[in-house]
Amino acid sequence: MTAARKIIIDTDPGQDDALAILLALASPELEVLGITAVAGNVPLALTEKNARKVCELAGRPGTKVFAGAARPLLRDLVTAEEVHGRTGLDGPDLPEPQMPLQDRHAVDFIIETLLAHESGEVTLCPLGPLTNIALAIAREPRIVPRIGEIVLMGGGFFEGGNVTPSAEFNIYVDPHAADIVLRSGAPIVMMPLDVTHKALTTRKRVAALRDLGTKVGIAAAEMLDFFERFDEQKYGTDGGPLHDPCVIAYLLKPELFAGRLCNVAVETGSELTMGMTVVDWWRVTDRPQNALVMRDIDHDGFFALLTERLARL
């Protein structure tokens, strides 16, 4: 048995973030060194609390949760309560968490953890705006060559945007942070809307989670019932896209995904296209290829993996 892959999950839960955290905690191939919360879907006071709620739901109250940046680097915080509900985790009735919030700042934890491990040993898994990751890189550039990989959910190209016509939410909330991360030189795998819009939580797939009959399975189904109503209305589909668990699924089964190495640049100057990820898919520029951009997913395999793993909790 190979050693578990060490990861830090940076997140702004969010129902889809919650399912990503559950998937990671259910998978012995991954060792979650810590969960760092960032403001995004809802303000930081809620995202750090929601991360702890999800750890307790998974029966993993020993997981370390750290609070990070309360706002983007340069812009005002934009949140998404209309999608995620007032708490960010509307749907199931989860109790207030009993486990403590760690007293170290998330950015300190990210820097100290990367410096304490061998180069390439720790993978960063950002599921929200990239503020914490960018702050860590800006404050301690020595961490960059030590990062094994940054596997992130964010951006879109052929699919356009989901918060503006051209921008995906995570990148739009803090485009300057995304710009720092994408120009850092760290190895990056990007899960854009082009992939996540092919991972639809159909009624049948949500029913499979509910039919697990466990606390986790039922809570996951309740989260998706609430979360996806917004996108079903918007896109007219059976089910909505399940974004963030794609990051964790890639670590477990990369063969579920297909994409290519491209240059990705982030628009930070234009209000019209602020936060757009400009992906040189056809390699028409000579800009350096800085991200492995995924475009396709075996969606049946993805949901089979998610359901099988959540059944273990």
Image: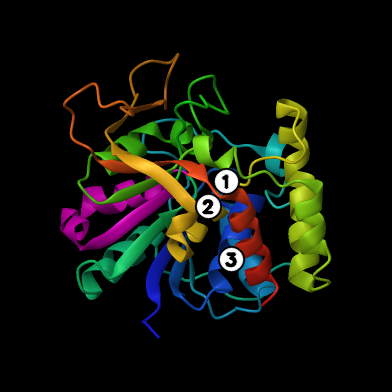
Q: Name the disc covering residue 243, or none.
A: 1
The residue lying at 22 percent from left, 37 percent from top is: 289
The residue lying at 17 percent from left, 53 percent from top is: 141
- Tell me where the magenta segment starts and ends, as one range: 129-152
Labels in figure, total: 3
| Element under disc 3 | helix
Q: How is the image coloured?
A: rainbow
| Image location of residue 201, percent across then percent down | 71, 47
Amino acid type at circle 3 is Leu
Amino acid type at circle 1 is His
| Element under disc 2 | helix
Is residue 144 one of those drawn in magenta?
yes
Q: Quadrant of the N terminus?
A: bottom left
Q: Name the disc covering residue 246, or none.
A: 2
Q: Quadrant of the C terminus?
A: bottom right
The answer to which of marks 3 and 2 sits earlier in the sequence is 3
Residue that badge 3 annotates: 23
| Image location of residue 122, percent across then percent down | 31, 67
| Image location of residue 170, percent across then percent down | 49, 39
Q: Are marks 2 and 1 in contact (CB under 8 Å)?
A: yes
Q: Are marks 3 and 2 in contact (CB under 8 Å)?
A: no
Spatial CA distance of label 2 from label 1 is 6 Å
Q: Nearer the viewer, residue 209 or 7?
A: 209
The residue lying at 25 percent from left, 27 percent from top is: 283
